[in-house]
Image (cartoon, rainbow, N blue to C red):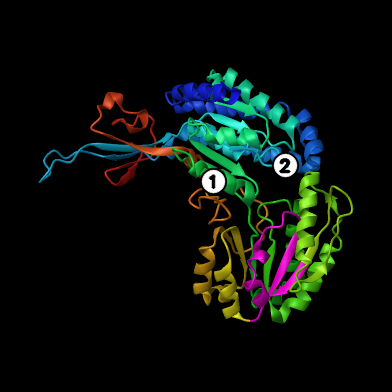
Amino acid sequence: MSQIAINFQDAQKAFLILKTLDKDKIAGFLEEMAKQIDAIRDDLIPTAARESHLPEGRITGELGRTLGQIRLFSALVAEGSWVEATIDHPDPDRKPAPKPDIRRMLKALGPVVVFGASNFPLAFSTAGGDTVSALAAGCPVLYKAHPAHPETSRMVAESIKNAVRISGLPKGTFHHIEGGIDTGQELVAHPLAKAVAFTGSYRGGKALFDACNARENPIPVFAEMGSVNPIFVMEGYLADRMDAAAAAYASSLSLGVGQFCTNPGLIFVPRSQEETFAAAVVDQLKEVAGAPMLHEGICHTYYQALETLTQSKKLKWLLHSEETDVLTGNVALAKIKASDWLADEAFQEEVFGPFGIMVVYEDRDQLHALAEKLKGQLTCTIWAEEEELQSSGDLLHLIEEKCGRLLFKGVPTGVEVGHAMQHGGPFPATTDSRSTSVGSYAIKRFARPVAYQDMPDSLLPEALKEGNPMAILRKVDGVWVNY
């Protein structure tokens, strides 16, 4: 029997225990998990910075976000209403047939496989949102470490294991697994795996999705595969904000050397303002120095993508960049006519790095055509005056169909961790547009609804007992109540 098979057996045993624990036990474990990770910050921050080539300031902020989202889920679990307890009382006198007592709630799926991301060594990795939301739901996690930051991952994994031990949870609650593609394939193929979470490339996410759907018993794959996050610019917006808008776009495009899934790789600009706006953006980008990318592979792939794009005669390069060494990423910007962009889907492909394409459109009808052609995105941003928005109802509804988060000011980089956040969108941005990988709703990816019909009150889960001993918000006979 392989080690992974043994890990799954441990995880399944842990699952059968976790599903019997009260919410305070799970919430306390998450609090302890945050405490244990925070305790190693002095060693963790420099280690993560060294392995990821990200500055310590960025890692410090990411650690704060990681601890914050762990505590967000701890509070969510402690409050308890996330299980969506729903009760329909019986009516034995109903004609022509009596109405039964039916009670429904969300229950944990079982062992979950989580793949770490390279661009967030903390927030989307070992103790990241996928891991924490699965644990919060009561699902054991088998975590596949990303090879780009192995020591960082091991340090965080030990903190999680310490929290498991201190909290008295079964040891199979969390497994840290290292290995290559074969290891990942074995994980997702195991019959005890009940779901997969992934953040990374389209190629990697789609391969996992296909593998899990080819299983004898298919399982859900929640893969966040990135996007180009277009910004739609209307004339009125730029009239009084040309320099500020150019600075905002340049800053967002180059932030973190462009290594964010919300990087704005496309911007649609009206022809009447293209020259002025392009010049202003280029002036800003010329001041951006090259910086280390996450690892040599990502850097090389970035420049390969730029080289491929240079073969197209439809692109006009406003700022070109060539590979100078194995790690440094330099910003690049190209321009294309809307008619040419519409004719070739290759210009919609994500280039992971500080590169953007400015698409120049002629009129509102052409802007509508651009939106219609657009593939699924994590975000879309609209820069427009309120009067322009009010006269663009059809366009707004169309853009809404293309993304998970619609912004009306600012830039898409920067994802708030909270209850209302939606980080997920239509394919190919994700494999399931109904889910989010950031925010408290992420917990619902790893739970399934179960209904109990005419079960004795003494046997019901606490969330569904008649007296509401958990004091949570429930829908009773169609009305939301907390008693």
Q: Residue at x 34, y 44 (%)?
A: 480
**With 18 as the anchor, is 231 left or right in this view?**
right
Judged from this view, the residue extending furthest toward the right is: 324
The residue identified by callout 2 is 61
Q: How far apart are labels 2 and 1 at the CA level?
A: 32 Å
348 in magenta: yes
Could you say whether the residue bearing mark 1 is in a helix, strand or loop? helix
Q: Residue at x 60, y 72 (%)?
A: 370
Query: For mark 2, does the 10 Å Cα neighbourhood hold few (<14), some (14 to 19), or many (20 or more) residues?
Result: few
Q: Residue at x 75, y 30 (%)?
A: 151
Looking at the picture, which amino acid does disc 1 mark? Phe
Magenta region, residue range: 334-362
Q: Residue at x 49, y 68 (%)?
A: 397
140 in magenta: no
N-term mark: 2 or 1: 2
> Which residue is nearer to you in this view: 411 or 225?
225
Query: For mark 1, does the 10 Å Cα neighbourhood hold few (<14), some (14 to 19), or many (20 or more) residues?
Result: many
User: Residue 457 in the image: x percent, y percent?
Assistant: 27, 27
Q: Is residue 50 above or below residue 367?
A: above
Looking at the picture, which amino acid does disc 2 mark? Gly
User: Residue 268 in the image: x percent, y percent?
Assistant: 66, 71
User: Residue 253 in the image: x percent, y percent?
Assistant: 74, 59
**With 156 as the anchor, is 364 left or right in this view?**
left
| Residue 209 - label | 1
Could you say whether the residue bearing mark 2 is in a helix, strand or loop? helix
User: Residue 30 in the image: x percent, y percent?
Assistant: 57, 29
